[in-house]
Image: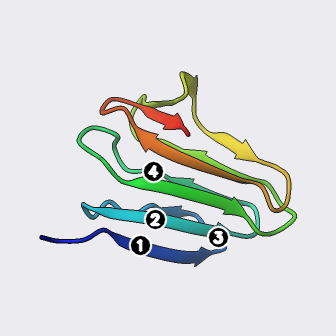
Amino acid sequence: GTGLTRSVNVISANTNAGAAAITDYVYLVSGTTTLTLPTAVGNTNLYTVKNTGVATVSIATTSAQTIDGSASPITLPVANTSLDLISDNANWRIV
């Protein structure tokens, strides 16, 4: 069978998160940056987003999808904080 892939990305500009199947994504983010998650529909990937700088990192969604029921974007305003996000097949959940 095929195994899980992990993709580690260092970003400092607005970026759309990857959506390849069977991939866990880690984003190490610096600067005032927005990471936009792909659609939650059919997505089984885990996304970890860590603020590695001192600016505010925003996490946005596509369409009208939410993160734990809240409209996006949500923010990580504190350095060295992180969130793990996973889809419930309709919206995003913090785990």
Q: Nearer the viewer, mark 3 or mark 4?
A: 3
Q: Which mark is residue 28?
A: 3
Q: CA separation, marks 2 and 1?
A: 6 Å
Q: Residues within 10 Å of mark 4 (few under 14, many from 20)?
A: some
Tell me if residue 31 comes above or below residue 19 in the rendering: below
Which mark, residue 37?
A: 4
Quarter where residue 81 is shown: bottom right
- The tag earlier along the polypeptide, 1 or 3, is 1
Contact (Cβ within 8 Å) of mark 3 with mark 2 = no
Relative to 50, is 21 on the left or the right? left
Where does residue 31 sit, x and y in percent of width and height? 76, 68
Outermost residue toward the top in this view: 69
Residue at the disc numbered 2:
25
Of mark 4 and mark 2, the one earlier in the sequence is 2
Q: CA distance from mark 1 to mark 3?
A: 13 Å
Which residue is rendered at x = 33% and y = 29% of the image?
90
Q: Residue placed at 23% from the left, 42% from the top?
A: 42
Q: Identify residue for label 1.
A: 6
Local crowd size for mark 2, using a 10 Å CA cut-off: few (<14), some (14–19), many (≥20): many
Q: Mark 3 and mark 2: span between their CA atoms?
A: 10 Å
